Amino acid sequence: MSNGSIPDEVIEAVLKHHDIVDTVGKYVHLSKNGKYMKGLCPFHSEKTPSFTVTPEKQIFKCYGCGAGGNSIGFIMQIEGYSFPEAVRAMAEDAEVNVQWEDATAEQTEKQKERQKLLDAYDLASRMYHFLLKNTEHGREAMDYLKGRGFSDKLIDHFQIGYAPPQWDTLSRQLTKREFPMELMKQGGLLLSRNDGSPYDLFRDRIMFPIWDARGRVVAFGGRILGEGGPKYLNSSESSLFHKSRTLYNFNHARPTIRKSRELVLFEGYVDVIKAWDAGIHNGVATMGTSLTEENAFMMHKNVDRIILCYDGDDAGRAAAYKNLSLLEKSGCEVKVALLPDRMDPDEYIGAHGGERFVREVIHDAVTSLKFKLIYLRKNHILIEDTGRIKYIQEALKLIAPLHSPMEREHYLKELAEEFDQSPETLKQELHQIRLEMQKLGTGGDNLDNPWNNVMNEKRVEPKTPSLLPAYHNAERKLLAMMIHDAEVAEYVQPRLGDQFNVEVHAALAAYLYAYYAQGKEPDPSKYMSTLQDDLLERAASGILMLEFDHGAVFQVIDDYIREIKKFPRMAASERLKEEMHRAERAGDFIKAAQIASEIITLERQQK
C-alpha cells in the first residue's frame, strides 16, 4: 500500500480503465497535434490552446496555468475531489471493485471517524425529512413551507426536513446506534452541557441538508420556525464541512453547469430552491454572502460566466458590488441580475412567476461594469452640477481600464447622452485617464497573467522566461530520465541521493526512490499517483514533457550529477567572496586572507 488505505491494484485498475485522452475528452475538446492532443484549458480562461495531453505518457500539462497530472489528478481538479474521492468515483465508473473504505486494520483512525460522521449526517438527514413529512411534529413546518410555495416534489428533491423543539431527538437516535458522542460534537451535530452530556444543536428549525460535490450530506442549514434567533443557523466547520470551499446545491447543479459553463450565484438556500423550480438548474449559493477566494476558484474551475443574483435591497447590492472584483480576479466573466423594488429572488418568483424571473431577471443580467455604474450613482446627487461632474469623473475611471475600444465607445455614448455631454470631451478625458494609468502601470488588464484575463481580446503574450541555471536544467533532465528508466534511478540514488538543489526536485526524487523500492516498473502516470500534491504534480508533469535522449550513456548522467553537486560549492564560493570584500573594506586584512584561503580550497574541489 503506497496511498494510505487504497490498494495499489485499485489505483492501477483505475488508471488502466481511464485513458487520459478519453477522461479529458469528456470535458475538453481535444485536437491532434503530432504525438500530442491539444485544447483550451478547463482550469483557466484562454483563447489560444496551451493545454496538452500526452497519450504515450498518460499525463496532461497546461503551459498557461501550470496544472498537470494523470487521469486521477485531472478528475480531482475538475470535480474538486480529494484523491480517495476521485479514485472511488473513477473505480465505480469503471466497475472496479472497491473495498478500501471498509474498516480494516490498515485504515487510519481519521478515515474511520470521517465515515462515521458521514453516516451520522446521512441518518440525521433522513430522520429530519421523515419527521417533516410523516409526523405531527412536522405539521406546522410543512404548512409553513407549503405557504411559501414549496411543493412536495421540491421538498423531496432537496430533502428538506424538520428538527423538533425537543433537546434530544437526534442525540437519542445517535446514542441508540452507538455513534461516539464526542465525535458527533466535533462534527457539528451535537453540543455539550456543563456536565458533558450531549444535546441537539438544531431544534425547532426547518432543515436544509448541505451536500459535498459527491452528493453526501456534510452539514445543515436550519431556519428557525418560531420566535428567537438566529434566523439561520449553519453547522460549524468540521473535517467534512468547510464553508469557504462549499457551494450549496453544486452536486445537483453540476451537470447543467458543466454543459452551459455558466452558474447563477444566489445568497441563500431558499432562493436556489425556488429558482430551481423556475427552471434555473445551474444555481448555487455560498455559505453567506462573504465570498472567499476558494469559492471563486472552485467556480472558475467549472464555469466561464457567473451571474450574481443577490437581493435587490441595499445590503444585497452592496454584497454584489463587494464580490465582483474577487470573481473577476478569478478569470470569470461576471454579470449581475437586477431585482426591482428591493425584492429577493424568492419574492420576485412568488409575485411574478418563474418564467418572468428567467426572462427579465436572469437573461437580462447586466455587465459587471454596468452594475458598478448603477451602484456608483447612489453616492452622488445627480440633480446638482457638482454631483453630476463627480459621477462622470468616477464613471470614466471605471470605463478607462476596458481593453476593447468598442466597449469604451459604448459606455461613453451612454454617458454623453444621459448627461448631455460632448462625446469628444469625454473621449479626451478618458484618454488622459488611460495615459495616467499607463504611467502607473495599471492598464487594467491582467498583464502578469494574460492567460487568465477573459477581457483581453488581444492577448498579451507571456514574457519569455529567463534561462534556467545549468544545475536546474540538469536536475530536470536527470529526473526525467529517472522516471522513465529504473536503472538510471538505481545508478543515481547512491551517487546523488536527495542532494538536489531545488526542494521540489529533491521531493520528487524521494518519491521516485520509494516507488522503485516497491518493485514497480517505470510508468509516469502510476508514479504521479504516489505524489498526491498539487505542487509536486505540476513540477512532475512539466519535467515529463521534456524531450531527451532515452539512450543516453552514463557519461551524460555523470555530467548531470557533477553539475548538480557543483552548484552548492559555487554558491558558497560567491558568498565567501562577498564576505572577503566586506572584510577588506573594513580594513580587516587578516580575516580577508583567511577567507581567500577558503575560496582557493573550494575552487580546487570544483575542478
Image (cartoon, rainbow, N blue to C red):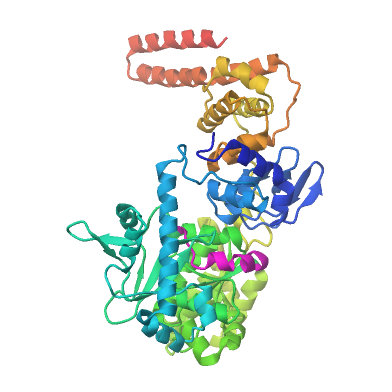
Horizontal side of residue 187 vs 10, given as left or right: left
Residue 445 point in image, percent of width and height: 58, 59
Residue extent of the magenta highlight: 245-260
Where's residue 443, x and y in %? 56, 60
- In the rendered image, is residue 444 in sight? no
Residue lying at the far front of the rendered structure: 176
> In the rendering, at what x and y percent does residue 356 appear?
59, 88
In the image, residue 48 lies at what x, y percent?
A: 72, 54
Q: Is residue 374 magenta?
A: no
From the viewer's perspective, is residue 186 above or below residue 483? below
In the depicted view, which residue is nearer to us: 605 or 139?
Answer: 139
Relative depth, front residue between 297 and 111: 111
Quadrant where the C terminus sits is top right
Q: Nearer the viewer, residue 449 or 432?
A: 449
**Residue drawn at (39%, 77%), measured in percent from left and top?**
315
- 2 vs 69, left or right, is left
Q: Is residue 249 highlighted in magenta?
A: yes
Residue nearest the observer in this picture, 381 or 480: 480
